[in-house]
Image (tube, coloured by chain):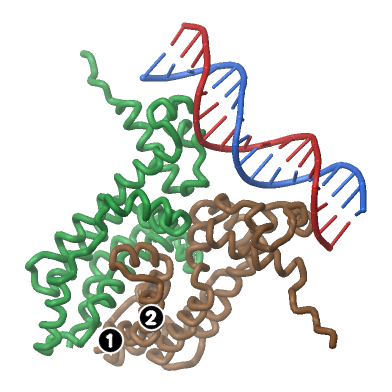
Chain colours: A green, B brown, C red, D blue
DNA sequence: GTCTATATATGGATAGAC
DNA sequence: GTCTATCCATATATAGAC
């Protein structure tokens, strides 16, 4: 019996490969040859599908950045109670990160080294503005009711994101400092899914 | 009256310039020409002082990584009480970061994109192992005495480092998401020096 | 030590055959 | 659509004058 085509289209293979290489090496570290090798195709074909390195990068970058915002917004802007919201946020965010472990470094790194690329071309489309109004109100309400300590919403959000994201950004550094191997580190990341929310809630609970 | 030479030696100027450029653009993003311009000298002179880009980078990288470890160790390994230790650690660490705001991205980025460079050549010298024994003992003791919730020392340290470092790594991202300008962000970073330690202590205190 | 000029290598991009 | 061969710009590195 004839098998259905297993391999993805060339275009898809290139995008997969490009993501892998860009994420690993950053824009300027990545070589078109690396991407071609990774996709097991010829270098010229990259240019056939995506005119230039710049265009290929922008596409990959966009596709991946855009994944992040909507999810975050829908949680931040939900009607859940504050503690539930924090738990949902952490669960959702860490889940997304464990599926895209290199995305934060990719974003942070390229945002830092080529801010102009981002702010000129990508930011206008990405609509990066968080919907924080409801969230701010909740924090103020809970503080007024004496349920949590007074804390600025920005601080709370920054701390939450820090606790979620840093272990992915700092993976090699942390592994080095603590001496963890890959398996150990994966277990630690897994365990954090349980720990992080309660760490945050503890710190603001009265 | 004859003034003492104000300008640093050429070698020093190159190192300053190289740090600035490498930190800003990463290894592969940095151009020797950029460094030469920054140091206001000729490109050839770079090679005269430091044979190759690779060697220059390694030197800069090393010098900066080595700054981090000893300080951290001396605090972690001190005889201070746990809460004091956390406060000292955060104060010291955030102080260091505010003097070297781009160092974390530099380290994390290069560690991720060129792990081989680091692990082969740099790690053996840097002696990255944290002295955590005393710290572990303290946490276990305090938990046994019911002063803090049970928490793994690794988790506590990772969270602490996350809360300190991430705002520097994710600066452009956070600025974009929250819409902060430079001044606002600097103020937020400044404010965190007061907030972070108590956030952590709150979360583990019973 | 510092410069200008140049050699050499690398990597993005294109031409043209199939 | 996919390949090989090639072009061309850029960047590292060196030679050699001062």
N-terminal of the pair, mark 1 or mark 2, is 2
Q: Quadrant of residue A123?
A: bottom left
Residue B1 locus on image (x, y percent): 84, 88
Q: Which mark is residue B202?
A: 1
Residue A148 locus on image (x, y percent): 16, 85
* In front: label 1 or label 2: 2
SS assignment at label 2: helix
According to the image, label 2 marks what residue?
Answer: B187
Q: Quadrant of residue B69?
A: bottom right
Q: Is residue A64 left or right of residue B32?
A: left
Residue A25 locus on image (x, y percent): 48, 48
Which residue appears farthest toward the front when viewing the image?
B1
* Pointer 2 chain: B
* Residue shown at 38% from the left, 60% from the top: A168
* Pointer 1 chain: B
Say above or below: B107 vs B54: below
Residue B16 locus on image (x, y percent): 65, 68
Q: Is residue B109 left or right of residue A126?
A: right
Q: Residues within 10 Å of mark 2 (few under 14, many from 20)?
A: few
* Residue shown at 74% from the left, 75% from the top: B7
Say above or below: A45 vs A128: above
Q: Residues within 10 Å of mark 1 (few under 14, many from 20)?
A: many
* Residue B28 appears anywhere in the view: yes
SS assignment at label 1: helix
Say above or below: B97 vs D13: below
Instruction: Count how many numbered circles sit on residues in the image.
Output: 2
Q: Nearer the viewer, residue A116 or B198?
A: A116
Q: Measure the C-alpha gap from mark 1 to mark 2.
A: 23 Å
Q: Nearer the viewer, residue B5 or B155?
A: B5
Q: Nearer the viewer, residue B81 or B91?
A: B91
């Amino acid at each position: 019996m004839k098998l259905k085509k297993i391999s993805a289209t060339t275009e898809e293979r290139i995008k997969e490969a490009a993501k892998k290489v860009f994420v690993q090496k950053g824009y300027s570290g990545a070589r078109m040859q690396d991407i071609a090798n990774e996709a097991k195709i010829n270098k010229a074909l990259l240019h056939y599908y995506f005119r230039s390195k710049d265009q290929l990068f922008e596409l990959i970058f966009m596709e991946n950045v855009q994944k992040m915002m909507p999810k975050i917004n829908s949680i931040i802007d939900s009607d859940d109670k504050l503690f539930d919201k924090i738990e949902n946020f952490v669960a959702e965010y860490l889940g997304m990160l464990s599926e895209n472990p290199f995305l934060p470094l990719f974003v942070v790194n390229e945002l830092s080294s080529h801010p102009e690329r981002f702010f000129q071309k990508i930011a206008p489309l990405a609509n990066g503005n968080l919907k924080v109004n409801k969230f701010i109100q909740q924090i103020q309400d809970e503080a007024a009711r004496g349920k949590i300590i007074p804390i600025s919403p920005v601080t709370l959000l920054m701390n939450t994101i820090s606790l979620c994201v840093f272990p992915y950004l700092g993976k090699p550094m942390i592994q080095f400092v603590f001496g963890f191997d890959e398996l150990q580190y994966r277990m630690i990341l897994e365990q954090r899914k349980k720990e992080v929310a309660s760490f945050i809630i503890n710190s603001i609970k009265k």
